[in-house]
């Protein structure tokens, strides 16, 4: 009887160990990921890669994580490098975002997302329109009305060049409000922080920026966020109306996501996409997501490609309307 009992215990222990091993195997689908960041440390691409890597490592979804920053060419240097080294880069994921679409259309670099293997969009940041706390404008509708009367009275600041994302999003919003987007007075600064400083000093009327970038100063009482570009209000800013709520048919999200090298097998790309999907179910993810104020917009593989194609069309149409594309 004792022998039978001990045998049962051994079987139970072995079964538990096998179940644990199978569970770990089912969860840890990817042994290693090398994150390629097309910009410097501290930027949005860098924080997305490192925040994602932190979650994947701490939650035991990926065994080995490494990072490489490669600035240059508006992200083009890293794209060209990933294509050139594709055969040796099967464990590499490059982070990117909306600018890969804009800069490809603008011919800042010759490649597009089609030259890579889109894996998944993972997070997003909505755009926001911001005024100083002491501004006479208390609603985005008031600014739109003044713009329609005389566009020269409204100057919009952005942390990127003319024809780039901050400019295009502002043009989209004023167009949706019935204004002439070509007449938008856009003042380009070489960084978001400098654009914010220009707004607070009175150089500009309005700032076009990311919602997450505006939240800290709004909480400090230095600025007011008049509107944001989500299809619904953000839990991080529940008092900020969407453009749609105000009657303007416009939405925009600056997605961030990951691309593998060209030629990576469907099986490998699916494994990357699956492990990124599993990331959302971890406690570690919630901590990192809330730290950066990210919105979850998981779009794996085919869904990601369809999203990119649609965004390329919409942004291309707007850029042509504004005269940035022929």
Image (tube, rainbow, N blue to C red):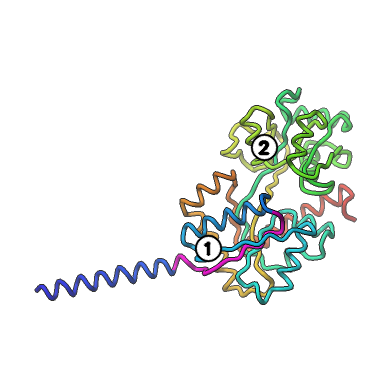
> Residue 111: within the magenta?
no
Image-quadrant location for residue 181: top right
Most foreground residue, 290 or 85: 85
Give the magenta part as a residue range: 26-40
Left/right of residue 188 with respect to residue 15 in the rendered view: right
> Looking at the picture, how far across and down is residue 112, in whole percent?
76, 64
Residue 37 highlighted magenta (yes or no) = yes
| x 65%, y 46%: residue | 125
> x and y percent of residue 296 in the render?
58, 50
Locate the N terminus by quadrant: bottom left
**In the foreground, 115 or 108:** 108
Tag 1 residue? 275
Taking the view exactly as shown, the residue that stands out farthest to the left is 1
In the rendering, which numbered label is found on residue 214? 2
Q: Which residue is pictured at 67% across the width and 37% down the height?
A: 214
From what the image shows, is residue 232 above or below residue 122?
A: above
* Residue shown at the point (68%, 32%) measured from the top left: 225
């Amino acid at each position: 009887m004792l022998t039978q009992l001990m045998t049962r215990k051994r079987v139970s222990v072995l079964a538990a160990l096998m179940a644990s091993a199978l569970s770990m195997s089912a969860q840890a689908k990817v042994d290693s990921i090398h994150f390629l960041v097309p910009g410097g440390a501290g930027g949005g691409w860098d924080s997305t890669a490192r925040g994602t890597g932190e979650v994947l490592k701490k939650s035991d979804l990926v065994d080995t994580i490494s990072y490489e920053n490669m600035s240059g060419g508006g992200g083009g240097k890293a794209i060209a490098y990933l294509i050139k080294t594709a055969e040796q880069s099967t464990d590499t994921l490059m982070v990117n975002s909306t600018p890969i679409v804009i800069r490809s259309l603008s011919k800042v670099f010759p490649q597009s997302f089609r030259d890579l293997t889109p894996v998944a969009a993972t997070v997003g940041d909505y755009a926001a329109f911001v005024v100083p706390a002491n501004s006479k404008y208390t609603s985005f509708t008031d600014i739109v009305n003044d713009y329609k009367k005389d566009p020269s009275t409204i100057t919009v600041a952005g942390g990127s060049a003319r024809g780039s994302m901050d400019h295009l999003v502002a043009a989209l919003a004023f167009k949706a409000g019935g204004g002439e987007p070509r007449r938008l007075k856009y003042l380009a600064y070489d960084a978001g922080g400098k654009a914010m400083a220009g707004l607070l000093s009175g150089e500009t009327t309005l700032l076009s920026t990311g919602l997450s970038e505006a939240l800290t100063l709004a909480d400090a009482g230095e600025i007011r966020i008049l509107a944001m570009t989500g299809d619904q209000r953000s839990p991080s800013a529940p008092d900020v109306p969407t453009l749609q709520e105000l009657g303007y048919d416009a939405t925009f999200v600056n997605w961030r996501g990951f691309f593998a090298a060209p030629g990576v097998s469907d099986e490998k790309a699916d494994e990357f996409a699956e492990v990124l999907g599993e990331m959302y179910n971890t406690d570690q993810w919630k901590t990192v997501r809330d730290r950066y104020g990210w919105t979850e917009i998981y779009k794996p593989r085919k869904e990601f490609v369809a999203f990119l194609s649609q965004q390329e069309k919409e942004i291309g149409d707007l850029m042509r309307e504004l005269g940035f594309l022929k």
